[in-house]
Image (cartoon, rainbow, N blue to C red):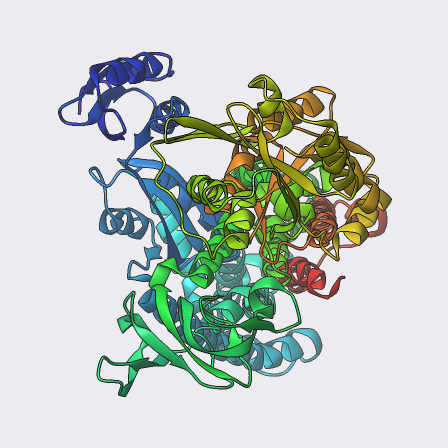
Amino acid sequence: MASNNLQTIFLPLENVESEHCALIVDKGLAKVNGIEKHSVELNNRRAAITINDPEAVSNAVKAIKDLGYGVSTIRKSFPVLGMTCASCAISAESIVKSSEGVINASVNYANAMLTVEYLPNMTSPAALQKAVQSIGYDLLIENETAQQETLEAIHEKKFKALKTKTIWSILLSLPVVAIGMFFMNIPYANIIMWAFATPVVLWFGKDFFINAWKQAKHRSANMDTLVALSTGIAYIFSVFNMLFPEFWHNRGLHAHVYFEAAAVVIAFILLGKLLEEKAKGNTSSAIKKLMGLQPKTVTVILADGTEKQTAIEDIIVGDIVLVKPGEKIAVDGLVVSGSSYVDESMLSGEPLPVSKKENEKVFAGTINQKGSFRFKAVKVGRETMLAQIIKMVQDAQGSKAPVQKLVDKIAGIFVPAVIGIAILTFILWLVLGGNNGVVQGLLAAVTVLVIACPCALGLATPTAIMVGVGKGAEKGILIKDAESLELAKKVNAIVLDKTGTITEGRPQVTGIKWLNDDDTTKQILLGIEKHSEHPLAEAVVSHLCNLQTVPLSSFESITGKGVKAVYNNETYYVGNKTLLAEKGINITNTIEQLSDEWSSQSKTVIWFSDSKSVLAVIAISDKIKDSSAEAIRQMHDMGIELYMLTGDNETTAKAIARQTGIGHYKAEVLPQDKAAFVKQLQQEGKTVAMVGDGINDSAALATADLSIAMGKGSDIAMDVAKMTIISSDLKKIPQSVRLSKQTVTTIKQNLFWAFIYNLIGIPIAAGILYPINGFMLNPMIAGAAMAMSSVSVVSNSLRLKWKN
């Protein structure tokens, strides 16, 4: 640490391997605002920065990552315990953000989760827990499986305690209301009301006062502050009036007590919290469903062939697992013997069971049907597809939509503003209210404090996001963050890759014309295609699989055109027609006619030649998915412009576009051209979604406003993408756009009602209608309205579940 609020931070660097790299990083850091001094220590693999602004740390990390280097950070989610309202989430988020070594933090009130990115060399979960504990909340820092079980046990216990408190509060409040409203003249009325109200306010409502005091110690305020102030003032005022009635009698006024207001407000707010907790539990049902898909134990086949029941945590990669009819599959793996049909609907949203035979992949959480088989564990624990899906859904549900940032700012100043309005209300009543000004002013101030509800505001966006993301996961649409879910509704142009997106992505050789038919030529072609990573090469390899290969002396990939290889000092080419034209290889009219005929049937044509002439021409067909044409029609009906990009020739591209109903297409496109085309559409003012499945699509996916990957494609495409369609069914894209529209509409409805409720409720509570028609809002009614406002917002979000 340095003086004058300067702080020195060490950022652990990745991929900074030379002095040149260090210089680039150092220059990048020079441009970051808030950094006073900076140096890159190559040997220590770290950057030392002295900052005068806490925001500079996250900006520095972003700057380093933008330069193509890495910073060793850890991103984790922890449950936050003890939060009671949206303002609590802001307080917890602020304290974590201001902790040393934290790059970014966000607290989601709806699922009570803190998502934090921090520098492991400067802080730890235990340190973050201490920071959160210092302001009256707590963090649960255990491993994920134990964390989930402990969290559920804590929530269950908390819910039961809340239920007990609510029931007792209501039972004890009923006689207070009855006496206060109808039997004020019975003997000892005030003492009986005091006796019933005291346990409600000071015992069942004690948490409001404890939390308000913790907030006050840190010069902060939240919903507990409002409840504690309002009920505390009403209770103390009533006790004073009960003990010293002559104070008011001497001034010609009657000494009213308001025990019923204090007790009923506590009872109603506890009831509201109970209903809210129950509803919030329903918003996270998608995650609970996914977590329930994994069995706790499995049958492992030992080396001697015997069966052993093993806990799922103890499975290691390479174990042979037996799956019996009707059992859930525990981890990801590869079938080694047996066959069956597996229901994968919980991952892909597709209802039909999928056939599984030897060497086919199976996934954790899917359900075996009638057959039995053994598989080898390939991915276990956090690596399984199910675990990745759960993490992705949790991260998305915990992320904040852009509109939430504005709401957070309002929630941050909401409580102090309400306290200010309550004080102003009391002063105005005192000045303008005549003889009864003190009592009515006090009641009006209490009602203002009771009716104001920051929770409805705080829950408006996250509950809708939780339900929207969860519903997407149930349909086999994985959404990476709230921003993507909000953005999908704005998409008006979609760029589709052909192979694996519009087509099945399983190309097969449907025709081959050899101009040189000896075995060596075929073996050379097989050898070249075995080296190639292109999906079409696999089709040729499986077609020629009964032949031997020959050793090549060199192999080179020519991006977007094909490959070049050398065997016995002769150069061979496999690729498209452009490659052969570039190399000056002659193509006869007969073979060209055959090629054109195949292309017109939407087949891809591959050429094989030596340095002088064509040796073979191959037709490869990739079947159009059954759902593609219908999905494209649905997107057209939504007013979305569709573009198909393919590396294939013009004739094949035209035939596929014609069969599927796509109006715009581009053929013979190189990977870098895809990203350029997306940029071009963006410059025309369009909001562009890119749909792809391969490594060659990753640049275009990263460039697009919204990137959608097909789940059966490459891991790189899925990492880059903001949405993943697990089943690779194009019909899921119009579904995701509809889901986005429904979610955004729900967020707008929630925010509208939360704002309108407060904008109308607070002035009425302050007594704005009193000069017009003599109406004063009863604090009890205000308590009920406040409790219901949160419940109505959560209930509105839950309506999303039942929309198509």
Could you tell me if residue 96 is visible in this image? Answer: yes
In the picture, the quarter occupied by the C terminus is bottom right
- Residue 802 percent location from the top left of the image: 73, 66
In the picture, the quarter occupied by the N terminus is top left
Note whether 562 is above or below 204 in the view shown.
above
Could you tell me if residue 264 is visible in this image? Answer: no
- Residue 497 percent location from the top left of the image: 65, 39
- Comparing 602 with 565, the one in front is 565
Tell me which corner region of the image, top left, top right, bottom left or bottom right, holds residue 274.
Answer: bottom right
- Comparing 462 with 488, the one in front is 488
Note whether 261 is above or below 732 in the view shown.
below
- Residue 645 percent location from the top left of the image: 68, 33
Left or right: 641, with 692 as reference point: right
- Name the residue located 75 percent from the left edge and 51 percent from the top edge: 628
- Name the residue located 20 percent from the left edge and 38 percent from the top edge: 121
Left or right: 457, with 21 as reference point: right
- Comparing 169 with 304, the one in front is 304
- Number of labels in the image equals 0
Tell me which corner region of the image, top left, top right, bottom left or bottom right, holds residue 800.
Answer: bottom right
Q: Residue farthest to the left?
A: 43
Note whether 154 is above or below 403 in the view shown.
below
- Name the residue located 45 percent from the left edge and 39 percent from the top edge: 528
- Name the residue located 35 percent from the left edge and 15 percent from the top edge: 28
Left or right: 540, with 308 as reference point: right
- Residue 462 percent location from the top left of the image: 58, 51
- Comparing 249 with 198, the one in front is 198
Note whether 30 is above or below 222 in the view shown.
above
